Amino acid sequence: MKQYKLIARKQVIIDIAHGNQKTEERDWTDYYKQRFKDIESPCKLCLRGGYNKDALYVEVKAESYFIKDYHNSWLDRLLGTVEQSIIFELGDVVDTNVK
């Protein structure tokens, strides 16, 4: 199972560790298209609250993922501009240091 490391905010990590957040969403930019070009489902996401060795982290199994289209603003709707995001559906927590 492939593992992907991502940086996330503290509250997001806490919510995932306690089971309150069941999805993780990222903008589908060129950076993430390159990073996830050979993604397989299921995979493991390791979300850290920074680069410090003592930062909060949670490792969670991502059961599946999908790409969602959305309009960012009323102007995007008017012009027909479509943005995309990748959404991971999270499963069981594998490991965490959240109390």
Image (tube, helix red, strand yellow):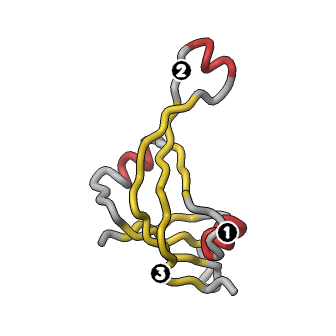
| Kind of residue indicated by mark 2 | Thr
- Label whose residue precedes the other's in the sequence (1 or 3): 1
Residue bearing the label numbered 1: 15
Q: Which mark is residue 49?
A: none
| Kind of residue indicated by mark 1 | Asp
State the SS at label 1. Answer: helix
Of the two numbered discs 2 and 3 in the rendering, the one whose residue sits closer to the viewer: 3
- Quarter of the image with the C terminus is bottom right
| Kind of residue indicated by mark 3 | Val
State the SS at label 3. Answer: strand
Q: In the image, is residue 68 above or below residue 75?
A: below
- Quarter of the image with the N terminus is bottom left
- Residue 72 occupies which quadrant of the picture? top right
**Could you tell me residue 38's position as x and y percent?**
27, 54
**Could you tell me residue 96's position as x and y percent?**
57, 83
Q: In the image, is residue 88 above or below residue 77?
A: below
Give the residue displayed 55% in from the left and 51% down from the top. 25
**Is residue 45 found left or right of 78 in the rendered image?**
left
- Label whose residue precedes the other's in the sequence (2 or 3): 2
Give the residue displayed 58% in from the left and 13% down from the top. 79
**Could you tell me residue 86's position as x and y percent?**
47, 47
**Is residue 6 found left or right of 97 in the rendered image?**
left
For disc 2, the neighbor class at 10 Å (few under 14, some 14 to 19, many from 20) is: some
State the SS at label 2. Answer: loop
Give the residue displayed 37% in from the left and 70% down from the top. 3
**Could you tell me residue 60's position as x and y percent?**
48, 73
| Number of numbered discs | 3
- Residue 39 occupies which quadrant of the picture? bottom left
Residue bearing the label numbered 2: 81
The one of 56 and 20 positioned closer to us in this rendering: 20
Q: Which mark is residue 94?
A: 3
Give the residue displayed 53% in from the left and 44% down from the top. 27
